[in-house]
Image (cartoon, rainbow, N blue to C red):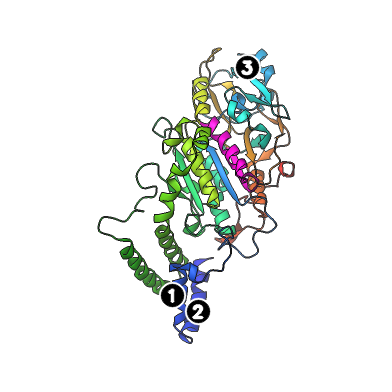
Amino acid sequence: MNPLRESELVETRRHFFGRTATGIGSAALASLVNPDLFANTSSSSAATGGLDGLPHFAPRAKRVIYLFMSGAPSQLDMWDYKPKMQDWFDKDLPESVRNGQRITTMTSKQSRFPIAPSMFKFNQHGQNGTWISEILPHTAGVIDELAVIKTVNTEAINHDPAITYIQTGSQLPGKPSAGAWLSYGLGSMNENLPNFVVLHSTVNGGFGGQALYARLWGAGFLSTRHQGVSLRSNGDPVLYLSNPSGMSQSMRRRMLDELAALNQERYAAVGDPEIQSRIAQYEMAYRMQTSVPELTDISDESESVLEMYGPDVKTPGTFAANCLLARRLAERNVRFTQVFIRQWDQHGNLPNDIRRQCGIIDQPCAALIRDLKQRGMLDDTLVIWGGEFGRTIYCQGKLTKTNYGRDHHPRCYTKWMAGGGIQPGIVYGETDDFSYNVTDKPAHIHDLNATILHCLGVDHERLTYRHQGRDFRLTDVHGNVIQDLLA
C-alpha cells in the first residue's frame, strides 16, 4: 500500500482507538509476540498473510526451488544437440543466421565468427529420447521428470541487466524479485523461517564469477518483509542471529517486547508501513534463533541420502549442501528458495571449465529431484534450473579442436523445470541448426515467469502493485502462460 494512503487510514484508526478501549492495541501486539494465542488451529501448511483472493485458482505447486546458474551455461555443450555443426568446424557463421543481431564488445571486433561445434558426445535418454551431453550423466538419469525448454529468450545481452531481468521482470534495478512477489501475494506457510531464502554456493572454497547484488532477491517497492534472506555458510547462518555474550533468551524477549511497543506508538503517529515490517522482522529473527540451527543441522539425514547428493554435501556452502538445504527448507514449507552458483561465464577455455562446473552441479541436481520425489514432495514443489542467457555457436578467441570459448547469446538458450504442475519428460521448442534462432515455440522470460506464477495458482496479470501512479507486475505488460508445459 502507498505510505501516504496508509497514513490517511491511520488517522481514522487513531480517532477510532481514541473512542474505544485501549486494549485492542495491546492485543494486536500480543498476537505478534505470541501468535499461537490468537491463531486458528490450521496446519502449518496453511498460508498466513498474502492478499485476499489469492491463490486465484487451485495451485499445483506450493513452493519453488530455483537453481540459478549465474554466468550463462552453454546450451550447445549441455542440452541443444547440433550434430550438423561438426561439418561446419571453423567455417564462418553465415550473416543470414546472425541477421544483424547485436553482439557484445568482447567479440564485435573479431575479424570473423568461426563455428565451434561442441566437443562433447550426446546420447538419448529417457522414454522421450531426449538428447543430453555426456557431462550430465546424473541429470540424464532423471530426464523423465524434467521439461526441457530449449527456446528461452531475452533482450538482455550483458550479465547484470539479464540477471536483473529474469529475476524481477525488468532490466532496470528497483523492481521486486519473483520470490518477493510470491511472498507478497501468497503469504507464508511457515512462522519460524523466512518466506524467501537465498543460498550462495561456493566453488573451490570461493565464489568468483559475476557479482550478485542483494537487489536480485530484493523486495523493490514492496514491503521489505518480502525480500529474500541470505543464509551464510560460515559462522551464524544469518548475521547477528545469535545473542551476544551476556544476553539471555529471556532478556532478548523482554527487549523485543519493549521495542515492539515503541514501534507501535511510532506507527500510530506516522503510519509508515515499514514500521510494521520492522516489528514482524524482529519477531521472525527471534523465532529463527531456534529454527535456523535446527534447519542447518543435517545430522538427522540418512547416509543413503547424503551419498545421493555426493561427496560435497557435508561441506557447508557447496552446491550439494545447498541443494540438500533447499529440500529441508521445502519440507518446512518455505515458499521460495533460490540457490545461486557462479562461474558459468566461459568466454574461453570452455570445455575444461564447463566439465568442472557440471561435475559440481550434476549429481546434486539429480539428487534433489529424486529426494523430493521419494518423499512425495515433487508433485507440489516446482524446481527450476538455468541461467540468464545462452552461448554463441561461434568461438570467442582462438579456436582449436579441443578448446574454444563462447560469447553471450540471448536469442535462445535452455532451462528445465520439474514437479509442481509441469509436464514431465518433454522437450519444448526447437532452435535452428546453429542454436542461434528459435524456429518453433519461443519461450520469452516473461512467459516463463507467467508459467511459474500459474503453477502456484496465480494469474500473472492480476498480481499487481500500484507504485508511482501505475500498476506493476512481475511480467510487466507481457507474458503468456506456456500451456504445453503444464501437466
CA gap between label 1 and label 3 equals 69 Å
Image-quadrant location for residue 486: top right
Give the residue at mark 1: 268
The residue drawn where x is 66% and y is 48% is: 450
Question: Is the Cβ of the residue at disc 2 closer than 8 Å to that at disc 1?
Answer: yes
Q: Which residues are magenta?
A: 361-385
Q: Amino acid at mark 3?
A: Asp
Residue 321, position as x, y percentages in the image: 46, 38
Outermost residue to the bottom: 19
Q: Amino acid at mark 1?
A: Ala
- Ranked by sequence position, the earlier of labels 3 and 2 is 2
Question: Does the magenta-highlighted stretch encompass residue 175?
Answer: no
Question: Which circle marks residue 13 in the picture?
Answer: 2
Question: Which circle marks residue 92 in the picture?
Answer: 3
Image height of 113 relative to 166, above or below: above
Residue 379 in sight: yes
